[in-house]
Amino acid sequence: MSGTLLDGSSRQKGSSSESVGSKSHFLSIAYYQRFFDVDEETVFTRILNSAIPRRTGNFIADFVQPLPDLWGPFWISLTLVFSIAIVGNFANFLQVYGNGEKEFQSDFSFVTGATSLIFGYVLLLPFAIYTYLWYHRAAGLQYSFFDILCAYGYSLSLFVPVSILCPLIPFNWVRWSLLIPAAIFSGSVLIISIWAMVKDDPNRLNAFGLCFLVFAAHALLAICLKEFFFDAASFPSSLEPVIKHFTEVIHTTTQQTHKNGTKIE
């Protein structure tokens, strides 16, 4: 087998940052510096193509190799966490004031829960897939661990706009209509990339089984996002109570301001 469990340096020659990283231990900071040496154009291209399944080629071979990055996956994952937390709490805020309640308390579990789910998915699934491929493949490896990790990180980019819209939409069927295409498109990109590596496996059951598990895990992530976060954000089914409440607040504030101005005169 060519390559080690965490090293993809055999395909990244000619880069000064890569040569420094390949000489460093994988537990050192210097080893990971090369994965954050990426420009905006590359990140944008990878975000765009992580949402578009391709008939020929695949995302990892065409857009990730030979220089996978961790900058994009990290910030996409972090953005998804905070969009879930911010929009979820905002939806709950509207619900509280729409019901005429006085106090609102932010729900920090949006942050902790989303962080555990999203970063756990992005880290553990690529490691499990790479370990499986590393163990079962007799020939040289096609992808490094960081290639797969990079692909998984970028696959979450479609969920960012979905996480902003879903908590603010009170209709369940609209939420599903946004979530299902996002899961199918991004999941298909992952499957096509993994299939390119296992399609020549003589054991077809293992090949198809792995691709099925990849998509099933991605679909399960989408379901967990909806059930535990998007649906947990209780956006009011009607904006009328919210508008009425804020109208009363504005009217009261205007009256108080007018009275204070009259007293000063």
Image: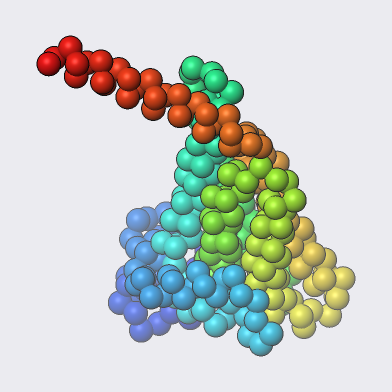
Quarter of image, res 143: bottom right
Farthest residue, direction bottom? 56
Residue 72: x and y in percent read 44, 63
**Of the pair 243 and 217, the residue shown nearer to us:** 243
Q: Where does the N terminus fall, quadrant-wise?
A: bottom right
Q: Is residue 186 above or below residue 257?
A: below
Q: Where does the C terminus fall, quadrant-wise?
A: top left
Residue 172: x and y in percent read 73, 46
**Of the pair 172 and 229, the residue shown nearer to us:** 172
Q: Please name the residue shown 43% across and 70% down the image.
A: 43
Residue 127 placement, left or right of 252: right
How many numbered marks, from 0 up?
0
Quarter of image, res 116: top right
**Of the pair 53 and 193, the residue shown nearer to us:** 53
Q: Is residue 109 above or below residue 58?
A: above
Q: Is residue 57 above or below residue 110?
A: below
Farthest residue, direction top? 263
Colouring method of the image: rainbow
Residue 120: x and y in percent read 59, 47
Farthest residue, direction left? 265
Residue 122: x and y in percent read 58, 55
Q: Please name the residue shown 59% across and 23% down the image.
A: 99
Residue 75 seen in the current view: yes
Residue 121 placement, left or right of 44: right
Q: Please name the residue shown 54% across and 18% down the image.
A: 101
Q: Is residue 101 above or below residue 225?
A: above
